Image (cartoon, grey):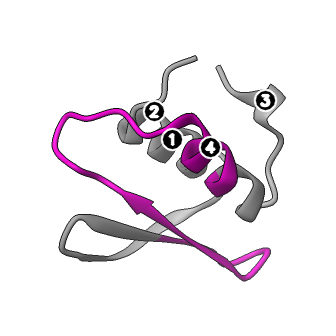
Amino acid sequence: MNLSPKHLINFLEKNGFIFKRSKGSHQLFYNPVTNITVIVPVHGGKDMKKGTFLAIIKQAGLDKNDLD
């Protein structure tokens, strides 16, 4: 499983999330249909921890099985 923030952001954007704003190393993505906002930490080229990655997908109301 690819745990990079870039991979997660692409997955969110494919599912209707749009970039709202950035604050330091955290990017906010918003889905106007579901009215859900999620925060994605982007720390350089580092991968996220698996639990963090899956928690963001869960907060977004998406299914981890739909990942590429």
- SS at mark 2 in the image: helix
Q: Is residue 8 left or right of residue 66?
A: left
Please say if the residues under marks 2 and 3 sit with CB atoms less than 8 Å apart. no
Nearest the camera: 47 or 57?
A: 47
Going by the image, does 63 lie left or right of 20?
right
* Residue under the image location 62 percent in, 43 percent down: 51
Q: What percent of the width, then of the height, locates residue 21?
A: 32, 78
Work out how far the residue at label 1 is from the one at label 4, CA to CA, in angstroms.
Answer: 13 Å
Q: Residues within 10 Å of mark 3 (few under 14, many from 20)?
A: few
Amino acid at the residue labelled 1: Leu
Q: Is residue 67 magenta?
A: no
Looking at the image, residue 43 sits to the left or right of residue 20; the answer is left
Q: Amino acid at mark 3?
A: Asp
Q: Nearer the viewer, residue 33 or 37?
A: 37
**Could you tell me which quadrant the N terminus lies in?**
top right
Res 51 label: 4
* Nearest to N terminus: mark 4 or mark 2: 2
Question: Which label sits on residue 7?
Answer: 2
CA separation, marks 4 and 2?
Answer: 15 Å
**In the displayed structure, would residue 56 be above or below residue 24?**
above
Q: Position of residue 49 (x, y in %)?
A: 48, 38
The answer to whether mark 1 and mark 2 are in CB contact below 8 A is yes
Say what secondary structure mark 3 lies in: helix
Residue that carries the numbered disc 3 in the rendered image: 66
Task: State which tag comes first along the sequence, 1 or 3.
Answer: 1
**Mark 4 or mark 3: which comes first in sequence?**
4
Question: Over which residues does the magenta segment extend?
Answer: 29-56
Q: Earlier in the sequence, mark 2 or mark 3?
A: 2
Q: Which residue is mark 1?
A: 8
Q: Is 10 drawn above or below residue 56 in the view shown?
A: above
